[in-house]
Amino acid sequence: MLTLHGTGDTMVIYNGGSFLGTPYPSAPETIGFWSRFNGCSSQSLSDFTLANTFDLETKLPGSETQLFTANGCPSGVSVEHLKIIDGGHIPAFYYNKTAQKVIEFFKRHTKSI
């Protein structure tokens, strides 16, 4: 499971909110759910490991993107979260870098048919 979310998103608020009166969970709550669902020992984003930082957002300075990985996942399972500090709803990605990160994730987690 790979999620990607900007903390500056005003449409789908990183820390949760509501849409047309219906509440939705925060990005950390969502990734925590997927970690538990997939049998990882990390129960919430605060239990994840900050594995790396890099620059994916062209309009933000420096290495604004943080890669968090869940701990204690079963063999063949990975739960990861890309947190884009101050990133909006549709970040101005470095397309080659972003595509590379997504492709790397899927290469590490291939499934036989």
Image (cartoon, rainbow, N blue to C red):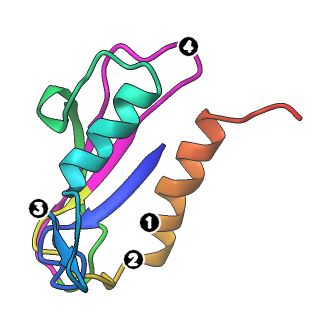
- Sequence order check: which comes first, mark 2 or mark 3? 3
Tell me which residue sits at (60%, 34%) in the image: 108
Left or right of 36? Residue 29 is: left
For disc 3, the marked residue is 15
Describe the element under mark 2 as helix, strand or loop: loop
Q: Residue furthest front?
A: 21
Kind of residue at disc 4: Ser
Tell me which residue sits at (47%, 30%) in the image: 78
Q: What is the distance, in whole Å, between disc 3 and disc 4 at their CAs? A: 30 Å
Tell me which residue sits at (31%, 20%) in the image: 71
Kind of residue at disc 3: Asn
- Sequence order check: which comes first, mark 2 or mark 4? 4
Left or right of 58? Residue 39 is: right
Residue 61 lies in the magenta stretch:
yes
Using the image, tell me which numbered label, if any, was put on residue 94: 2
Describe the element under mark 1 as helix, strand or loop: helix
Using the image, tell me which numbered label, if any, was put on residue 75: 4
Nearest the camera: 101 or 38? Answer: 38
- Sequence order check: which comes first, mark 3 or mark 4? 3
Q: Give the foreground label among 2 and 4.
A: 4
For disc 1, the marked residue is 97
Give residue 84's position: percent from left, percent from top. 21, 64
Magenta part of the chain: 60-82
